Each structure stands twice: as structure tokens, then as C-alpha cells.
Amino acid sequence: MRGPRTSWTRYLPLLLTALLCALPALAWAAPGVPGVPALPDVNVGKIGGQPVSLPLQTLLLMTAITLIPSMLLVLTAFTRIIIVLGLLRQALGTGQTPSNQVLLGLALFLTAMVMLPVWQKAWGSGMAPYLNGEIDFQTAWTLTTQPLRAFMLAQIRETDLMTFAGMAGHGTYDSPDAIPFPILVASFVTSELKTAFEIGFLIFIPFVIIDLVVASVLMSMGMMMLSPMLVSAPFKILLFVLVDGWVLVVGTLAASFNAV
């Protein structure tokens, strides 16, 4: 009898936890029971003039949170920065050093530094007045997205914009505000990819030259079995450190974005 009793008592904390979690639901189900407080009927927000319940608003909020990583990738300077840092690591030939976590952390802080003026304008013109009750949501949305649209338009190439406009069946636009948001985002992403690879190409050139020189020296010495990448790696790291490469790359990345 000792074994079954021990097995049953193992689940006693789980049963107590489930009972404690069920107490608020019991109080909600029986608001008329004397001595048992009932939770208030909370309605938060409105859609189409109808109140939205708290669980539904929580669901919408959690759904919006899942879109934050995608928005970070396609609506900010993160794409260009992380691609250039990845190409730099590949050009150095150091494998996984720096690690992905280090590159992502550096890219996030650089993105915050570049995007901070845009976010400040968006907050001051749109979100702050809306939270103070000075404007409605539609006006706040327009004023909040205008600095972001201006930032993306400053980085977009005209050829990319016309390409996506043609794919959508549109002609030329009368003003920047007339550009649909999906076309703006697609043009911004392709422009960022092109700019990132252009910067990466310029970063690769000195390291490729070092590889060619080392390979030529090894071939002339008859050391064909020795990997040129193994010999050139210390020289590339030394060159990168002597010219203070990280500061140069970070400064170039920050300066490569057109000011709004």
C-alpha cells in the first residue's frame, strides 16, 4: 500500500495549483454568491463602434507581437546592417567568429541608433498626441507612419520603385503619399539588399587581394598542399585590426543611410 499512496501524493501539488487557478473562474461564474467577489465585465477598445472584449483584444495584441520580427527586418535599417556584417565575417574567413549572437546584437544596436530620429518623430507627431486624447486613431496612424515612409523613400532607388509599380499595374505616382505601402516596402527591401551587397563587395576586395598574394607566394615556393586560406587568415585579421576595421565598418554603415 505504500507505493500507490506515494504515487497519489505526487500529484497533490498539481491538483492544488489547478484548484487555485479555477477560483477566479468560479467567482466569475457565480457573481450572485454572497461573500464571493465577482470580476467586472471589462470591455476595452472599439471596432466599428462595438466594444471589444478583453480576451479578444489580448488575442489581437499577441498576434501583432508576432509580426514585430518581420517589421524589424523589412521596415528598418536592420537588413542592410546584418547582411554587411555577415559578409564581413565571411571575407575575414574566421568561420563563426564573431558568433551569430554577437552580430545580431551589434546589428540591433546599430539599427536602434540609425532609426532613433525616425522613431522620435513618429512618437512626437502621432503616438503621443493619440495617447493624450488629442487626435483620433486614424490621424495618429497617418502621422506615425509618415516619418517611417519618409525614411524608406530616402533609401529607395527609382528603378526598384518603378519595377514594383509596373508589377502592380500602376503608372507614376503624383506624390510620395500616393505610393501604396506594400509597393513601398518591397522597393525598400530590394534597395537595401542591393546597397548591402555593394558595400560587401567593397569590403571583400582587400581580403581577396591578400588571398591572391598568399596563394601566389605559396605556389612559387612549391607549397601547393598548404591551404592559402589557412596562411592568409592571420594576415587578414592583422590588416583589419591595424586599420581599426570595426569602427570603419560601423561608421560606414551608419553614414550610408540617406538622412530624412
Image: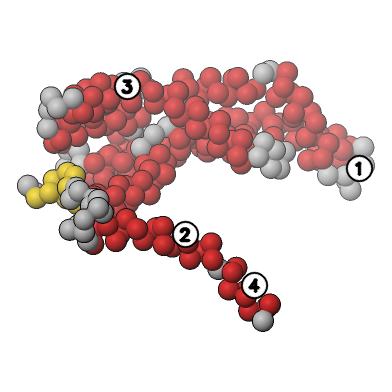
Q: Residues within 10 Å of mark 3 (few under 14, many from 20)?
A: some
- Residue 230 seen anywhere in this rendered image of the structure: yes
In the rendered structure, are the residues bearing label 4 and label 2 in contact, judged by CB atoms less than 8 Å apart? no
Q: Which mark is residue 120?
A: 3
Front in this rendered view, residue 118 or 13:
13
* Coloration of the structure image: secondary structure
Q: Earlier in the sequence, mark 4 or mark 1?
A: 4
In the picture of the structure, the residue carrying the numbered disc 2 is: 17
Which label was assigned to residue 6? 4
Q: How much space separates mark 3 and mark 4, taking CA atoms? A: 61 Å
Q: CA distance from mark 3 to mark 2?
A: 45 Å
User: Which residue of the protein is positioned furthest toward the left in this rendering?
Assistant: 49
Residue at coordinates 14% horizontally, 27% vertically from top-left? 133
Of residue 27 and residue 127, the one placed in the foreground of this image is 27
Q: What residue lies at 59% left-to-right and 35% top-to-bottom?
A: 103
Give the Cα separation between the discs numbered 1 and 2.
71 Å
Rendered residue at 68%/77% (across/down):
2
| Image position of 157 (left or right of 207) | left
